[in-house]
Image (spheres, rainbow, N blue to C red):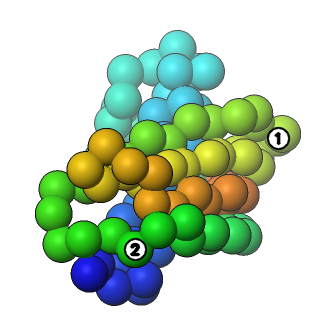
C-alpha cells in the first residue's frame, strides 16, 4: 500500500500547482512567465477513504475559489478507478522571491 505521508505530499503538491495555474489564468498570463507566481500550504485536511495500492494513481485538483491571496482547492486521489483520498487545502500566495 502507498504510505499516507506520500499520499499527502502528492496531493499537497498537485493542489499548490492548481492554485498557481489558476492565478496565472486569472491574470491572463502564460504559465511560468515572470514574475513567477507561487503559493504555499496554509492549511490542509486529508481524508482517506480506502487503502491505496502501489499502482498508478490519478489526481484531480480544482480551485474552488480565490479570496485575495488565498486559494481554496479540493483534490481527489484515485487508484484503479476508485477514490482513495480527498484533500481540502488552503494555499496562500507568497512573493516570487520565496522560490529562491
Residue denoted by label 2: 51
Residue at (15, 63) in percent of width and height = 55
2 or 1: tag closer to the N-terminus: 2
Task: Give percent across and percent down for residue 19.
Answer: 55, 43
Question: Please, is residue 27 above or below residue 10 in the view?
Answer: above
In-front residue for pair 96/31:
31
Task: Give percent across and percent down for residue 69.
Answer: 76, 47
Q: Is residue 51 left or right of residue 12?
A: left
Residue at (50, 42) in percent of width and height = 61
Q: Are marks 2 and 1 in contact (CB under 8 Å)?
A: no
As drawn, the residue found furthest toward the left would be: 55
Mark pair 2, 1: CA separation: 36 Å
Disc 2 is placed on an element classified as loop
In-front residue for pair 48/36:
48
Identify the disc placed on residue 68.
1
In-front residue for pair 19/99:
19
Identify the disc placed on residue 54.
none
Classed neighbour count for the residue bearing mark 2: other residues with Cα under 10 Å, few (<14), some (14–19), many (≥20): some
Q: Is residue 73 left or right of residue 31?
A: right
Task: Give percent across and percent down for residue 59.
Answer: 37, 47
Q: Quadrant of residue 100?
A: bottom left
Q: Would residue 16 be visible to someone looking at this image? A: no
Quarter holding the N terminus?
bottom left
As drawn, the residue found furthest toward the top would be: 28
Residue at (62, 36) in percent of width and height = 63
Amino acid at each position: 500500500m502507498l504510505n499516507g505521508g506520500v499520499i499527502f505530499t502528492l496531493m499537497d503538491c498537485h493542489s499548490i500547482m492548481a492554485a498557481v495555474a489558476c492565478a496565472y489564468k486569472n491574470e491572463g498570463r502564460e504559465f511560468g512567465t515572470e514574475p513567477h507566481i507561487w503559493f504555499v500550504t496554509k492549511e490542509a485536511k486529508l481524508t482517506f477513504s480506502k487503502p491505496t495500492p502501489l499502482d498508478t494513481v490519478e489526481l484531480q485538483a480544482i480551485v474552488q475559489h480565490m479570496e485575495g491571496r488565498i486559494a481554496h482547492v479540493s483534490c481527489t486521489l484515485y487508484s484503479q478507478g476508485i477514490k482513495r483520498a480527498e484533500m481540502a487545502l488552503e494555499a496562500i500566495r507568497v512573493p516570487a522571491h520565496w522560490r529562491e
